[in-house]
C-alpha cells in the first residue's frame, strides 16, 4: 500500500510538473478581451514596448482587472469602457512582474470628472488610495498623466504604487509578496536621496520628499515614465525598484 501511495504521489508530481505552463506568456487571450488591445495600444507606451506574446498577456490582465472591480462614477454619468481600460492598463503595468497579483484588497474604484473635496481632509484631491480598499481618481488628472507620458507624473501609476504597498501588508491571499529585505534596502536608499530632493539636485519632484510612501510612489512614476534618466541620476533606486516590481528584464532594456 505504501508503495502504491508513493507511486501515486510521484506520478502526481510528474503530471503536475508537465501541466504547469513554462512561462506566463503562454496563457491565451480570451476572445472577450481582444477588443481591449486597440484602446491599450493608443494610450499606454509601456504596452507598446512589450513583445506580442506579452501584449496578449497584458491585455488579459487588463480585462481581469476591470471585471474584478466595482466602478463607481461620482458627479458624472458613467465610466466608459475606454476610461476603465486606460486606468486598468496603467495599474497592470505596475503589477505585470507578478503574474498572479490582482490587488485583491482594492475592489472599488471611484471616479470623479475633476478634483474633488476629500471626505477626510476637506481639501481638493486629485486621487487617493483608501486603506479600506477604495481607489479614488480624478479623470481629468488621469488623462494629464496619459497625454504627457514622459514627465514623471502619472496619477494612476502614483496611486497604484500606494495600493501595491498596502496590498503587500494587508493579510489576505496576496500579501508579503515583496521580501522585507528588498523594501528595507529601498527605504535605506530613500533616506539618502530625500536630502538631495530637498536640495533641488534630484530628478524627483519635491513631493517625493514628503515621506517614505510618497517617495516610493513618485519613484514608480519616474521608473516607468523616464526610466533612463532615473537610472542615470539614482542608479541604486532604479535597480531596487526594478527588483521590487520584478521588472528587471524591462528595466535593463531602457536607454536614453
Ligand atoms: Zn501619494
Image (cartoon, rainbow, N blue to C red):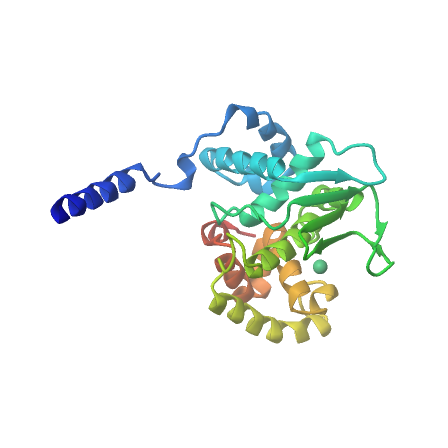
Question: Between 116 and 247, which is closer to the camera in this rendering?
Answer: 116
196, above or below 217, in the image: below
The reply, left or right, for residue 20 in relation to residue 109 is left
Q: Residue at horizontal 56%, vertical 36%?
A: 64
* Residue 60 can be seen in this image: yes
Residue 175 horizontal/vertical position (percent) = 52, 57
Quadrant field for ligand 1: bottom right
Observer able to see residue 203:
no
The percent coordinates of residue 52 (x first, y second) are 47, 33
Q: Position of residue 149 (x, y in %)?
A: 67, 46
Q: Position of residue 121 (x, y in %)?
A: 84, 61
Q: Residue at x 70, y 50 (%)?
A: 134
Taking depth in this image into account, of 222 and 256 the one nearest to the observer is 222
Dividing the picture into quadrants, the one containing residue 203 is bottom right
Q: Is residue 73 left or right of residue 177?
A: right
Is residue 245 found left or right of 87 in the rendered image?
left
Residue occupying image coordinates x 49% and y 33%: 56
Residue at image position (72%, 63%) is 205
Amino acid at each position: 500500500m505504501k508503495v502504491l501511495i508513493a507511486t501515486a504521489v510521484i506520478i502526481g508530481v510528474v503530471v503536475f510538473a508537465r501541466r504547469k505552463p513554462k512561462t506566463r506568456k503562454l496563457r491565451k487571450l480570451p476572445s472577450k478581451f481582444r477588443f481591449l488591445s486597440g484602446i491599450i495600444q493608443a494610450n499606454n507606451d509601456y504596452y507598446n514596448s512589450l513583445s506580442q506574446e506579452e501584449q496578449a498577456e497584458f491585455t488579459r490582465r487588463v480585462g481581469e482587472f476591470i471585471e474584478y472591480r466595482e466602478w463607481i462614477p461620482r458627479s458624472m454619468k458613467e465610466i466608459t469602457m475606454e476610461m476603465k481600460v486606460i486606468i486598468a492598463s496603467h495599474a497592470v503595468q505596475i503589477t505585470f512582474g507578478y503574474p498572479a497579483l490582482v490587488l485583491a484588497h482594492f475592489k472599488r474604484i471611484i471616479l470623479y470628472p475633476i478634483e474633488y473635496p476629500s471626505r477626510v481632509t476637506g481639501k481638493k484631491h486629485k486621487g487617493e488610495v483608501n486603506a479600506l480598499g477604495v481607489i479614488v481618481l480624478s479623470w481629468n488628472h488621469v488623462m494629464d498623466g496619459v497625454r504627457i507620458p514622459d514627465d514623471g507624473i502619472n496619477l494612476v501609476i502614483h496611486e497604484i504604487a500606494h495600493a501595491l504597498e498596502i496590498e503587500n501588508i494587508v493579510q489576505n491571499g496576496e500579501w508579503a509578496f515583496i521580501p522585507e529585505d528588498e523594501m528595507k534596502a529601498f527605504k535605506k536608499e530613500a533616506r539618502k536621496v530625500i536630502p538631495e530632493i530637498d536640495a533641488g539636485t534630484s530628478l524627483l519632484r519635491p513631493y517625493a520628499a514628503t515621506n517614505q510612501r510618497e517617495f516610493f510612489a513618485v519613484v514608480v512614476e519616474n521608473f516607468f515614465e523616464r526610466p533612463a534618466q532615473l537610472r542615470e541620476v539614482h542608479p541604486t533606486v532604479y535597480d531596487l525598484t526594478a527588483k521590487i516590481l520584478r521588472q528587471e528584464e524591462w528595466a535593463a532594456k531602457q536607454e536614453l
